[in-house]
Image (cartoon, rainbow, N blue to C red):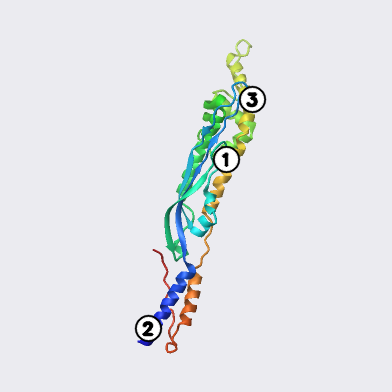
């Protein structure tokens, strides 16, 4: 009975040592970014229009080690690109906190569906911002960017001919303005088409100014996805090492055949 009590003490010390060597806190947080406002371009005659809201963006259900995610500030990897006219704050809220003993039962980041939802939301916001930025032709640009992904929008802003093709399509004109002539004379349709094309060319430099913003949002989304797939450091081997050392240190002399048969870890 004495040996049994001593073995129980050894087992208890081993359990405490194993738990103490590997415990960590897992948290589930939500990260919200106030994207601030954006400034549409100024008109030389009419002046600058007021800044417009970009809205808030929240990424929910982000899971990770509290020491990494909060103490080391890795939650900031889930902030999104601000519009840089006003605001731009980013913060987190803790939704859950748990004491963990087993890193294998812990995930990192958030769900793919949540990140897809964020990308879709940012894409829609970018389309709206770009069309409002081009306030002289908001409806036309809105038509041009509708249903386009962020890489497609970036490609359009990077290539003047691509921009003009979309501009002409949005205005219901063909690219070359080659409409039938009447009695050898240029038709009104052709004149309108050429004027429309010239207007599109004149607006392109203003639109191209927004390409860096779109590219930053694309990079931001890629970085968030990369942070979300960050690998975990498995620390389960520490349990067996620490537990074994403490068990052997407390092993009674008359229990030479005693040993740890099983280590079970979990969390609650």
Q: Quadrant of residue 180?
A: top right
Depicted 27 relative to depicted 121: above or below: below
* Disc 3 element: helix
The mark that comes first in sequence, 3 or 1, is 1
| Label disc, if present, on residue 151 of the rendered structure | 1
> Which image quarter is the C terminus in?
bottom left
Query: In which image quadrant can residue 72 be found?
Result: bottom right
Residue position for label 2: 5
Residue 240 at least partly seen: yes
Residue drawn at x 47%, y 75% as measured from the top left: 243
Determine whether label 2 and label 3 are within 8 Å by CB.
Answer: no
Task: Check the image and report above or below for 137 versus 67.
Answer: above
Question: Mark 3 = which residue?
Answer: 202
Which residue appears at 50% of the width and 47% of the height? 91
Regarding mark 1 in the picture, which secondary structure is present there? helix
Figure quadrant of residue 81: top right
Residue 240 position, x and y percent, is 48, 74
**x then y, percent, for residue 17:** 46, 73
Callouts 1 and 2 close, C-beta under 8 Å: no
Q: CA distance from mark 1 to mark 2?
A: 68 Å
Viewer-proximal residue, 98 or 162?
98
Q: Nearer the viewer, residue 53 or 257?
A: 53
Question: Mark 2: which secondary structure?
Answer: helix
């Amino acid at each position: 009975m004495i040996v049994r009590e001593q073995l129980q003490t050894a087992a208890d010390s081993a359990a405490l040592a194993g738990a103490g060597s590997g415990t960590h806190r897992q948290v589930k947080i939500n990260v919200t970014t106030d994207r601030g406002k954006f400034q549409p371009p100024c008109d030389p005659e009419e002046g600058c229009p007021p800044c417009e809201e970009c809205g808030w963006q929240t990424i929910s259900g982000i899971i990770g080690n509290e020491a990494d995610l909060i103490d080391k500030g890795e939650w900031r990897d889930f902030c999104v690109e601000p519009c840089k006219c006003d605001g731009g704050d980013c913060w987190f809220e803790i939704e859950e906190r748990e004491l963990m003993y087993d890193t294998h039962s812990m995930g990192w980041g958030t769900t793919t569906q949540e990140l897809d939802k964020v990308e879709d939301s940012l894409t829609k916001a970018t389309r709206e911002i770009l069309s409002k930025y081009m306030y002289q032709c908001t409806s036309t640009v809105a038509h041009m960017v509708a249903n386009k992904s962020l890489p497609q929008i970036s490609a359009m802003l990077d290539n003047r001919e691509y921009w003009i093709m979309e501009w002409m399509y949005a205005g219901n004109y063909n690219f070359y303005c080659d409409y039938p002539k009447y009695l050898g004379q240029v038709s009104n349709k052709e004149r309108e088409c050429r004027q429309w094309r010239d207007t599109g060319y004149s607006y392109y430099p203003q639109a191209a100014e927004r390409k860096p913003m779109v590219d930053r949002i694309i990079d931001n989304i890629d970085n968030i996805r990369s942070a979300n797939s960050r690998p975990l450091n498995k620390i389960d081997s520490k349990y067996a090492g620490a537990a074994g050392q403490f068990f052997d240190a407390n092993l009674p002399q008359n229990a030479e055949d005693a040993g740890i048969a099983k280590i079970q870890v979990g969390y609650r």
